[in-house]
Amino acid sequence: MSINPVNSSNGVVCYLPKERFGYFGWPSIAKQDDGTLLVVASGLRTAHVCPWGKTVICRSRDNGATWTYPQVINDTPMDDRDAGIVSLGGQRVAVTWFTSNTTIYHKPDPVSGWPAEYREEGIVLDSWTLPMCNRNIGSWMRISPDGYYWSEPVQVPVNTPHGFIVLKDGTWLYLGKRWDIDRETATHVLNCPIAAIRSCDEGRTWEMLGTVPLPEDCSNNAVHEPHVLELQGGGLLGAIRTHKANAPFRVTLTRSWDGGRSWSQAEECDTIGSPPHLLRHSSGAIVMVYGYRLEPYGQRAKISYDEGQTWSEEILLRTDGPSSDLGYPASVELPDGKIITIYYQALQHGDNPGILYTIWELPAKA
């Protein structure tokens, strides 16, 4: 059974529906201590897969009512994808992302060369040498004291769309896909596990902890893009995008009670959709949001009041997506207790997807 959100309203963070470099995707959101909302995404690109992806940031100082034009904060020679942003306290934030060797997706026709619609893209990709790709391929992180000035990029051993979390003891916990690199092809090795790493020195060094055991009918190629939350009892709850053959994306859950060194076997939680993002609301509830790529396309949520043991009925944040190219929602809580959830989605057929939002209230606890 599904229900509609309480007192919800929709809006736009950034939207360039017809511009050639107007595609935005895979966003994340954070809140600075002065109340400023920061949204990052891979943007000013031409398509879901292209060579031109950049990390962009938009700001709102009025709880999402208005937003700045997207500013480029990161632009490597490769496709920069899946930006995450994490509040470090005060005005400090960290941004995470990964680079993609797009040449593996776009190959020229052996007879006629690059098709006309990809000719300029082909010229760009033909300039990508193996040494250049090996210098730039990987999972990355940058730190900012204020959201405007950024440190040099640092490579990180794992990756996931919304980045790491800061634990109550101040250490950083990153649950992500292990990001091993095949240097002969300058590409990410796909068959890697979901692994937890921890840093006690703000990302300068990372300790590899444990990996997540999978169901017997599931391989490492079927699990991606987890997010993690610290439980009130001191444990960790991980939610993972899981994609078995001939089945839609689903969410599986795993737990750790020893700081991420060991994890329970991932189990389904009766949730179709992905990837998940977890938020601790001031009420104590855990809010899980996720994209929904079956008709009606859109964004959905579930609530848990018992630390992820059980979940509410599905909450329909949006059901008006014109295609399945959408999702990757993430949330923060606003000062009045409402939730702002951002995601990528188009408003109508033929538009580039942009970054949109829904502001909504938690339903009354049953």
Image: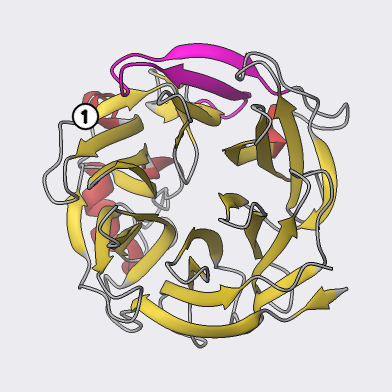
Q: Residue furthest left?
A: 149
**352 in magenta:** no
| Above-or-below relation of 263 to 128 | above
Q: Is residue 188 above or below residue 87?
A: above
Locate the N terminus by quadrant: bottom right
Position of residue 282 relative to residue 223, above or below, is: below
Q: Is residue 247 visible?
A: no
Q: Residue at x 32, y 68 (%)?
A: 116
Quadrant assignment for the C terminus: bottom right
Between 41 and 324, the one nearer to me in the picture: 41
Q: Position of residue 105 (x, y in %)?
A: 46, 47
Give the total of numbered labels. Answer: 1
How many neighbours does mark 1 have within 10 angstroms: few (below 14), some (14-19), or many (20 or more)?
few
Q: Dot 1 lies on which element?
A: helix
User: For this view, does 327 lie left or right of residue 68?
Assistant: right
Horizontally, is 204 left or right of 160 in the view? left
At label 1, which amino acid type do we have? Met
Q: Residue at x 63, y 51 (%)?
A: 276
**Residue under circle 1?**
132
* Res 89 quadrant in image: top left
Q: Which residues are magenta?
A: 188-212
Give the side of residue 252 with respect to residue 360, left or right.
right
The answer to if 200 sits in the magenta stretch is yes
Horizontal side of 326 relative to 162 (left or right) equals: right
Q: How is the image coloured?
A: secondary structure
Q: Residue at x 65, y 36 (%)?
A: 232
Q: Where residue 100 appears, x then y in whole percent?
A: 38, 40
Q: Is residue 262 visible in the rendered structure shown here?
A: yes
